Amino acid sequence: MISLDPAQAREHIDRIDRFRILVMGRANAGKTTILQRVCNTTDQPEIFNGEGEKVDATLVQGSLKRGEHNIEDELVFKSNRRFVFHDSRGFEAGSEGEFEVMKEFVMDRAKTMKLDKRIHAIWFCIPLNESHRMVTAAEKKFFDMCDTGHVPVIVLLTKTDTLALDAFIEVDDDGLNKDDAMERAAEVEKRKLMECLIKVKGWLNKSRFPPHDYLSLTGMQEEGADCTMLLTCTANALNEEGLQQLLISTQQSNLGLCMEFAITK
């Protein structure tokens, strides 16, 4: 495979007009919801195959729910066409062949000569509503075997709202009035989230290719959820100022994000 070195890529970065993200994680990890929030929509994405041809969305939606679809497919939301997303299969229960397809896609799209086809970041979703298997063997395998090179992998802890119920159950027997119970539950939820983050970091930081960063996503189930932290974290992980500017340009309406990077740069 022919690849372009970073110095050459830097010269051609202004030719890229869409920011491309691979979203990974098991089925039902909240991936689609995150993409909808980032693109400020409740609509389902349009789907295009690797040749740029539109795919029948009704056929694909059922496949998306089952984690059965082509990683080459491009997911684009009408509300923000400057993002292109790829969704890995929920490969945690997949065959060796499926893992290899995913790995080949990552390795190829990290270095391809076709700059407009390169992935710029990877969001790896780990849901917290399955505490009995917070990090699966297949997920650990990815971080042990997939060298993404200059493409940063950011682990996103999703489905964090499940901790709110756990927190309420924990404080329910304390005999507190409603306001005190709410305040105490919020503290317990925050503590539980930090404990989960520490656990996941402990497991994945031992990997051969550990994540670049970690982020807990809260409130994603709410329409209009603020994604500034996610976008800021992603921009900070990029090693090219041109790519940072490309990402920021997808969010012209996010004044806080634009101002932060105007100041830091």
Image: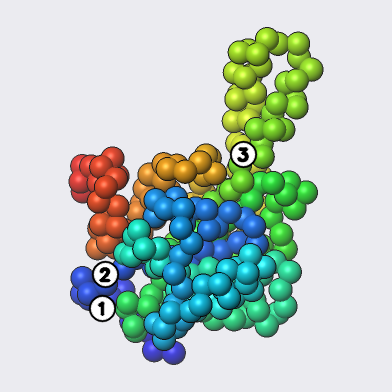
> How far, Cα to Cα, is label 3 from label 2?
35 Å
> Which quarter of the image is occupied by the N terminus?
bottom left
> Which of these two is toward me, 105 or 87?
87
Q: Tell me the crowding category of disc 3: few under 14, some 14 to 19, or many 20 or more residues within 10 angstroms, Cα based.
A: some
Report x, y in % for residue 119.
41, 71
Callout 3–callout 2 Cβ contact below 8 Å: no
Evaluate whether residue 144 shows in this view: no
Q: Which residue is mark 1?
A: 8
Relative to 29, 260 lies left or right: left
Label 2 residue SS: loop
Identify the residue at image location x=76%, y=11%: 175
Identify the residue at image location x=48%, y=79%: 55
Identify the residue at image location x=25%, y=51%: 252
Q: Quadrant of residue 5?
A: bottom left
Relative to 247, 156 lies left or right: right
Q: Which residue is mark 2?
A: 17
Counting residues from the N terminus, which is met first, the one under dot 3 or under dot 1? 1
Counting residues from the N terminus, which is met first, the one under dot 2 or under dot 1? 1
Foreground: disc 2 or disc 1:
2
Counting residues from the N terminus, which is met first, the one under dot 3 or under dot 2? 2
For residue 80, above or below residue 261 = below
> How far, Cα to Cα, is label 3 from label 1?
44 Å
Evaluate whether residue 80 shows in this view: yes
Report x, y in % for residue 49.
46, 81
Report x, y in % for residue 87.
53, 68
Q: Which residue is mark 3?
A: 161
Q: Amino acid at mark 2?
A: Asp
Q: Amino acid at mark 1?
A: Gln
Residue positioned most to the bottom: 1
